[in-house]
Amino acid sequence: MKRLLKNFAFTAGLLLTVVLVLVAIAAPLLAPFDPNAQDTIRRLEAPSHSHLLGLDDLGRDVLSRILWGARVSLRVGFSVVILASLVGITLGAMAGYFGGWLDTLIMRVTDILLAFPGILLAIALVAVLGPSLNNVVLALATIGWVGYARLVRGQVLKVREMEYVTAAKALGARSPRVIVLHVLPNVINPVIVMATLGLAGAILSEAALSFLGLGVQPPTPSWGAMLTSGRRYLGLANHLAIWPGVAIMLAVMGLNFLGDGLIDALDPKYRKEM
Amino acid sequence: MIPITFGILTLVFSLIHMIPGDPAVQIAGEGARPEDVAAVRKALGLDQPLWTQYVHYVTHVIRGDFGNSFQTNLSVADQIKQRYPATIELAMGSMFIALLVAFPLGIISAIYRNSWIDNVARFFALIGVSMPSFWFGPLLIIAFAINHEWFPVSGREEGLKSLVLPSLTMGLALSAILTRMIRVSLADELTQLYVTTAVAKGVTRARAIFRHALKNALIPVITVLALQFGSLLTGAIITEQIFSWPGLGRLLLTSISTRDYPQVQASILVIALTYILVNFASDLLYGVVDPRIKLE
């Protein structure tokens, strides 16, 4: 841990991420106003002492909506990472460990999904499933598992030839036991790094989909959706287009820093594979 | 490439069948009359067996026939032909900006490694990759279209002037990635023995860098460039929305909001196929720029 904390990228990233998580957890305590409370007479009001980041087009406090928006971003981020990594790790481990037709099948599916531009597939899926928070998670997990599957398969191919795996098999351990107890713990480091960077990617993609009107629906506060309404009032109320973007950038930058620091700390060789 | 193209075709075909419930009812609208629902079902061929629908779809797409738009009843292929050049123009403009920024910054950064200038370049690269285009675009509009009326806020009517802000939005983000890439690649080459040998034999340092090291450093950069061109096409979906740029991405989003599924399917297919084609070209480029690499 000491070595990790000496790494600037890791420490800065950890700090920003901890702040992000704390803000999301404590949003009800930190937010000065109800994020959905409207004061239509004061709509588009610039930042002031009573409303530090101003009011939006419906007279809602921008700071409170940004604080509550952290919850949506993290909820989507964690849900996508958990779902995508579970599917990806399972399929990747099976493909790498068993090989044969199963490997071919899983890898051809990943080839197709990787050939398809990620955000385009997410837009396509949300377009047919309908815009909602759950569908955003589903769409992003559908494109996200592929990376984990490829990574884990590659790692498992190396690990399955190790002597301790042969020993476990010789002692009579069945395949699921060998995979879960002996193979996966030895391939998990790069997966942790990918999950950290994936969290940043999921937050950014959720914001992008919400910005396009395909993500979280009003009145739920979402950073991306806040930027959409901010775009309509450029020149009139610039604060609406500035602050949600700052929140997105800090969150993404923090997680990217953390992931970068983890690469150096956990597995420097992995930098080349990324 | 052919199996992947068919995979993409199948995926795009199946999109309409992923619509929850009866797609025909969803497309016609919840309160639609039964005869309207039947008309939609017939128009989309949903009354046919799945296999027939698939063969019909693939054969028509191969002939360049994507059907007619639900909204305008115009040929979908014609609409795409109209919008496609605008998207390519935007991608080219962004690539130009990216190269203009990344080359000098990456080279200086590699030559003066760990100096203040290198740190500034690295910080710029980090900001660039973390900054979402849907935030940066509006910031550029505020600064250069509203506060200083140098460029138009949106549209494509003013030619090159209209192209500047959307290209900057995508180009600067890409330049961040390229700067990092050029820095790492050139810094690596500068430590190679052939550079030391060249300098020892009396070649000036500038010549050793620009004539010898840079050439080799550019091999991975060129291939990344080609790959990134593909990602610019998808990035254009968001940028076109910000600047009301009349390209394929904007057409896609408009069709999604009006539930114009033939248009949605065709736009997605064309963007995806262009992306694959560009990626394939970048694979071929590997072999051209570095003859040691042979494609299997």
Image: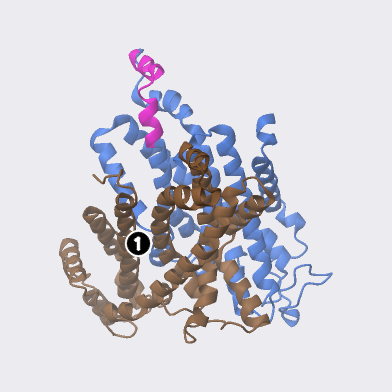
Whole-percent x and y of residue A236?
68, 82
Where is residue A27 shown, x and y percent of the image? 71, 55
Where the N terminus of chain A falls, by quadrant? top right
Q: Quadrant of residue A130?
A: bottom left
Task: Report the amino acid beneath label 1.
Answer: Tyr
Q: Which residue reaches farthest top? A: A171
Tell me the shade of chain A: blue
Q: Position of residue B25 (x, y in %)?
A: 32, 73
Residue pointed to by mark 1: B275
In the figure, the brown chain has which letter? Answer: B
Q: Position of residue A136 (x, y in %)?
A: 48, 59
Q: Secondary structure at mark 1?
A: helix
Any part of residue B140 in sight? yes
The stretch of residues the image draws in magenta is A153-170
Most distant residue in the front direction: B202
Q: Is residue B98 magenta?
A: no
Along the viewing direction, whichever of B91 and B235 lies nearer the viewer? B91
Badge 1: residue crowd in 10 Å (few <14, some 14–19, many ≥20): many
Q: Is residue A173 above or below residue B107?
A: above
Tell me: residue A170, above or below residue A74: above
